[in-house]
Amino acid sequence: MLRTMHIFCVFLWRDFTLGWKSKNSYLINYILIYPMLYAFTFLYLQSNIYFGAHQQAMGTAIFVGNILLALITLSNKYTNELMFDLEQNRFIDYQISLLPPRFVLLERITFAALCTFLMLMPYFPVAKLVFRDQFVTTNTSWIALEIMVFVGAFFCSSYNLLMSCILRTAQISQFWIRINQPLLILGGFWVPRYIIQQFSPLLGALTYLNPLMYVTEGLRQAAIGGNQFLPLWICLVMLLLFTCLCIITSFYFFKKRTDHI
């Protein structure tokens, strides 16, 4: 077990070293540009255009959910490398010769989740620093908010890794159009769940099956609070369950893809 953990840490360190060197442009994009652009669009422009002046709370609710797109796209960039590797260089074959296949997948998920979290950890503090009162944080629990970003990053990484074990590169565009976009739209990206529930109780009930809804609901509960959002503990428990489900399913599809022992 000690040898396994040592190799696990070596591969994790390797991925961090190569990942940060090849993707250092992400630092500017996700730490500065994304929060600034999204905050300006949703905290300032949309809240004033759609809801009028002094409606910063609604703008805050919309803005908080919009980190979902950054979570899923950034974690996808880190996990997609497995898909390309399976079809080309197959460095993965070398890895599974040294490390049990399940640990190889867990290392990939851990790497993607930690990188995603580190990139997006300053997301809300930067928005608050720049836009101040436009970002309503009267009831914000900053620790809970960062915990939700962390848990959301782990779920998105496990979900994207599962897709990397299932899909071929030619299927990526169809997958985003047919699967990811509906999940995002009905996952609280544009509007909170309680508004969907008011519009259509049936559609609101179906959103409980969408794991992305628990990401946005947990973030909004931590940032805004109130009975209109799902309790934080429910969001955390459901995301952990969905994460475990994605990981276990990825073990199955990875074995089918590589036919490892």
Image (tube, grey):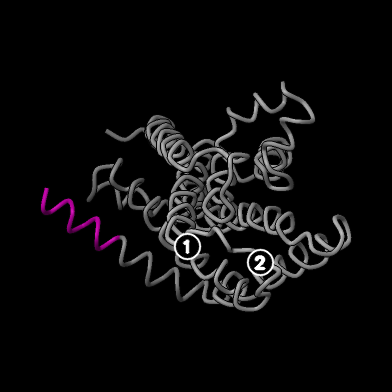
Nearest the viewer among 160 and 83 is 160
Tell me the SS state at disc 2. Answer: loop
Magenta segment boundaries in residue numbering? 1-11
Picture coordinates of residue 174, whole percent (x, y): 71, 39
Residue 2 colored magenta? yes
Q: Quadrant of residue 138?
A: bottom right
- The image quadrant where one finds the C terminus is top left
Residue at the left extreme, as displayed: 2
Residue position for label 2: 135
Residue 101 colored magenta? no
Looking at the image, tell me whether mark 2 or mark 1 is earlier in sequence order: 2
Q: How far is mark 2 from mark 1, CA to CA?
A: 13 Å
Residue 146 against residue 133 in the figure, above or below: above
Residue position for label 1: 142
Would residue 47 appear left or right of 176 to someone viewing this image? right
- Residue 76 in sight: yes
At x 47% / y 43%, what residue is drawn? Answer: 232
